[in-house]
């Protein structure tokens, strides 16, 4: 394997890529450590700097910050998600925050997929798009 094959595409990391989450459910994800996310993380953590440094920040505050970070800068869009009544669940940042709060597994999955380098390699994405 060539080292260059390990590189990820920075544009894809920032602008996001479509990833199949389930049969008919797709999410568009930016990389977790994208520039917007890094900037927002600093802003979200600023009021809690002292608690973070002392290790006294509550789990609830940390979870709230992670959900806001993901909903605003990582989970960029979805398609194919339905409400329980069968109506389309339309994407918005606010709706993403609700859904991420409602399901710890959805949050974990989005975090995991947004950290997987292979999802942001141009060649692999082109292969995936060719198969969908």
Image (cartoon, grey):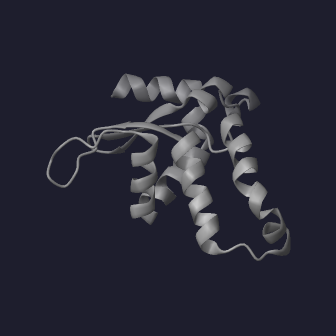
In this image, 88 relative to 47: left or right? left
Residue 50 lies, with reference to residue 20, above or below; the image says below
Q: Quadrant of residue 77?
A: top left
Give the x, y percent position of residue 30. 57, 36
Residue 132 lies, with reference to residue 102, above or below; the image says above
Give the x, y percent position of residue 116. 59, 45
Q: Nearest the camera: 32 or 7?
A: 32
Give the x, y percent position of residue 84. 19, 55
Can you name the residue that lies furthest to the front here?
A: 47
| Quarter of the N terminus within the rendering | top right
| Quarter of the C terminus within the rendering | top left
Give the x, y percent position of residue 62. 64, 65
In this image, 47 relative to 19: left or right? right
Marks counted in the figure total: 0
Residue drawn at (73%, 27%) of the image: 4
Residue drawn at (68%, 44%) of the image: 40
Q: Quadrant of residue 50?
A: bottom right
Can you name the residue that lies furthest to the left here?
A: 85
Residue drawn at (50%, 28%) of the image: 125
Q: Nearest the camera: 2 or 69?
A: 69
Residue drawn at (85%, 68%) of the image: 53
Residue 65 lies, with reference to residue 2, above or below; the image says below
Q: Nearest the camera: 11 or 43?
A: 43
Q: Nearest the camera: 109 or 89?
A: 89
């Amino acid at each position: 394997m060539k080292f260059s094959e390990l590189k990820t595409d920075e544009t894809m990391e920032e602008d996001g890529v479509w990833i199949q989450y389930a049969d008919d459910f797709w999410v568009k994800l930016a990389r977790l450590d994208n520039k917007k996310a890094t900037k927002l993380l600093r802003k979200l953590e600023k009021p809690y700097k002292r608690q973070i440094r002392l290790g006294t920040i509550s789990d609830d505050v940390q979870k709230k910050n992670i959900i806001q970070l993901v909903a605003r800068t990582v989970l960029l869009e979805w398609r194919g998600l339905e409400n329980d009544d069968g109506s389309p669940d339309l994407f918005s940042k606010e709706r993403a925050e609700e859904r991420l709060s409602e399901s710890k597994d959805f949050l974990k999955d989005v975090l995991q997929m947004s950290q997987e380098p292979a999802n942001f390699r141009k060649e692999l994405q082109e292969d995936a798009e060719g198969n969908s």
